[in-house]
Image: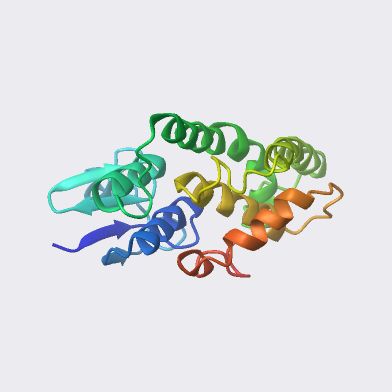
């Protein structure tokens, strides 16, 4: 059976999964779920993911949610020749940066993205927007220092799952409309390289921060 992906393409976490599928070359079908396109808080969807979040994948009878878990599943099962890392130390670094993207890099941007990208009602406090951008910038400077070491990619010299997650996050930084006062030359060079990947181009377009 063809793998199914449930989620809207405006979700950065859905785009992680779609990019990985493109790198692997695995066929899939996608269904729109997630607000404002299709409310996931209905019994049909909550039976698959009780959190009511996207994405969810259905691989035959197997159901999985949480984007980073999905990335690892796809890489190990289908991406042995493309995205799976056999070396334990290298694989651990991939896990490290996937975790950092989810727990350290993502949270600070929440208010700013809701205000400046999603235009969510209630997210109009200028002080909170500035604070969100400042905290986001601190994390981006950490990434800048790491990439400036010159290994090439986030987890080392090879493109990995970590670059899918971090690459999309960097894309969000550059496309969110605010004045970029922080100079990030290593991040900028990295961004230009990863967005040229054939499988990633579609998910780092001008309209999808």
Residue 146, x across and y down, in percent: 68, 37
Residue at point 60%, 49% (across, down) = 169
The answer to whether residue 73 is left or right of residue 96 is left
Q: Decide if residue 102 is in sight here.
A: yes
Q: Quadrant of residue 135?
A: top right
Q: Is residue 181 left or right of residue 122?
A: right
- Which residue lies at the image location 22% right of the left edge and 59% below the top edge? 3
Residue 6 rendering spot, x and y as whole percentages: 32, 57
Q: Quadrant of the N terminus?
A: bottom left
Rendered view: 183 above or below 192: above
Q: Is residue 31 above or below residue 66?
A: below
Where's residue 79, x and y in %? Answer: 31, 52
Left or right: where does residue 145 sit relative to residue 9?
right
Quarter of the picture containing the C terminus is bottom right
- Position of residue 172 relative to residue 101, above or below, is below
Between 116 and 167, the one nearer to me in the picture = 167
Rendered residue at 48%/69% (across/down):
198
Residue at image coords 52%, 65%: 197
Is residue 48 visible in the rendered image? The answer is no
């Amino acid at each position: 059976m063809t793998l199914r992906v449930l989620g809207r393409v405006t979700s950065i976490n859905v785009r992680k999964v779609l990019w990985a599928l493109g790198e692997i070359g695995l066929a899939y079908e996608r269904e729109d779920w997630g607000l404002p396109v299709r409310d996931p808080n209905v019994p049909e969807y909550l039976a698959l993911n009780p959190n009511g979040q996207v994405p969810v994948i259905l691989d035959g009878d197997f159901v999985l949610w949480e984007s980073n878990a999905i990335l690892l599943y796809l890489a190990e099962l289908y991406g042995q020749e493309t995205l799976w890392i056999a070396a334990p130390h290298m694989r651990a670094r991939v896990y490290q940066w996937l975790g950092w993207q989810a727990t350290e890099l993502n949270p600070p941007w929440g208010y700013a993205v809701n205000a400046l990208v999603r235009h969510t009602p209630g997210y109009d406090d200028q002080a909170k927007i500035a604070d969100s951008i400042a905290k986001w910038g601190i994390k981006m400077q950490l990434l800048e220092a790491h990439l400036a070491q010159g290994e090439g990619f986030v987890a080392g010299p090879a493109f990995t799952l970590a670059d899918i997650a971090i690459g999309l996050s960097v894309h969000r930084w550059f496309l969110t409309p605010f004045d970029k006062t922080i100079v990030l030359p290593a991040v900028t060079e990295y961004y230009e390289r990863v967005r040229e990947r054939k499988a990633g181009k579609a998910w780092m377009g001008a309209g999808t921060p």
